[in-house]
Image (cartoon, rainbow, N blue to C red):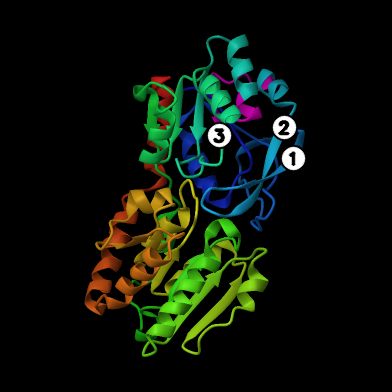
Amino acid sequence: MKKVAILTTYIAPYRVKLFRILREKLDRLDIIVSTLMEDGRQWPVEWDDLDVTVTKNIAIKETYRHPNGFKDTKSIHFSWNILFILFKIKPEVVISTEMGFRTLCAIVYRRIFSNTRLIIWALLSEVTEEANGWVRKILRRITLHQADGVLVNGKSGYRYIESFGFPAKKIIITPQTVDVKMFANSPIDREAESMFRLLYCGRLIELKGIIGFTDVLNEWVKNNSKYKVEFWLAGDGPLRTDLEMFRCVPNLKLKILGHIPYERLSDIYRQCGIFTFPTLSDEWGLVINEAMASGLPILGSHYSQAVNELVEDGVNGWAFYSDDFASTYNAIEKVFATSVEDIEKIRFRNRKKALKLQFEDVAKCIIEAINKA
């Protein structure tokens, strides 16, 4: 079909299979990464037989405060030899994630080789971009109008890109997924003791809203002493110590599992009954796909694009605003007011829905964007 190069920061384990499927549909696929693995990630570097090039890179850390009340630090990568790599492999289509320095290099390459096409893979939502100042917004408007197409995760990302005046016909919604079959292989039934056991998977950082959610959960359990509630947290990060020292009421038990290797995550999902994702800002949230494939109802934040795309409140989960005490409290109330019979129906409903979104579907959207460009 075409020679395609994907420019991205790193390759997460759940992306490898998608890239392999894409490679089979193209004449050639090269992946150019800025770093072996992003800071704070404990995943192994596993590329299989993909054609991957690691750039020479300078990373600068930027700390920002989001309107939703959290502080976060992200790395800005300046991969200064991207152009040399592109000149060497001569792709016909370049897909660049985000809209920073690597995309600027892709624009320069496209201007030199006019037959080349540029697609921006915009991994964002309206919420994730709320912290951006006017300078970045101006730069994005300029950057977008150099692109031949844009991939977005969902409707929120679509609205954000369209707000810059980018043609709607050139925006392709490309929902995210994982290897859902891996998580759907586990039994869907739950024992009584795990039926309402809460689970969170992810980094223990401010952005994920874990401390605020635990505060509200603790208050709810305090006011409903007839319930004995367990809340498991699979992950690690700077907030781990705070969570380990959290003073729970007697009928609430926090279990900090620490980092779990990706291949063992399905075992953790199988031992729990309700998945909670109280993030304050997420462009998607692939744990939602994992949890649904595992048959877990979702107690998730509206600030996750995955929750807004995949969860229908009261049908296959409960959505709430994680920066609002009353909204969070009421959502927890609804969970425990749901009958066991209805919980069981949601399990089957979620697994069925998750299995409808597989890597082949994502690859199809990317190929569509390439053909349109």
Pick the front one: 51 or 275: 275
- Tell me residue 339's x, y (percent): 24, 78
Q: Quadrant of the N terminus?
A: top left
- Tell me residue 116's x, y (percent): 54, 15
Q: Amino acid at mark 2?
A: Phe
In the shown orientation, is residue 347 left or right of residue 207? left
Q: Which residue is mark 3?
A: 97
Write the start and end of the magenta stretch as one range. Answer: 88-103
Helix, strand or loop at mark 3: strand
Earlier sequence position, callout 1 versus callout 2:
1
- Say which of marks 1 and 3 sits in front: 1
Q: Residues within 10 Å of mark 1 (few under 14, many from 20)?
A: few
Residue occupying image coordinates x 45% and y 52% = 178
Marks 1 and 3 sit apart, C-alpha to C-alpha, by 18 Å
Q: Which mark is residue 292?
A: none
Q: Which residue is mark 1?
A: 60
Work out whether residue 185 can be spotted.
Answer: no
Q: Quadrant of residue 191?
A: bottom left
Report if the CB atoms under discs 1 and 2 are less than 8 Å apart. yes
Q: Amino acid at mark 3?
A: Thr
Number of residue marks: 3
Earlier sequence position, callout 1 versus callout 3:
1
- Tell me residue 204's x, y (percent): 60, 63
Report if the CB atoms under discs 1 and 3 are less than 8 Å apart. no
Q: Which mark is residue 78?
A: 2
Marks 1 and 2 sit apart, C-alpha to C-alpha, by 8 Å
Q: Amino acid at mark 1?
A: Ile
Pick the front one: 78 or 180: 78
Q: Quadrant of residue 354?
A: bottom left
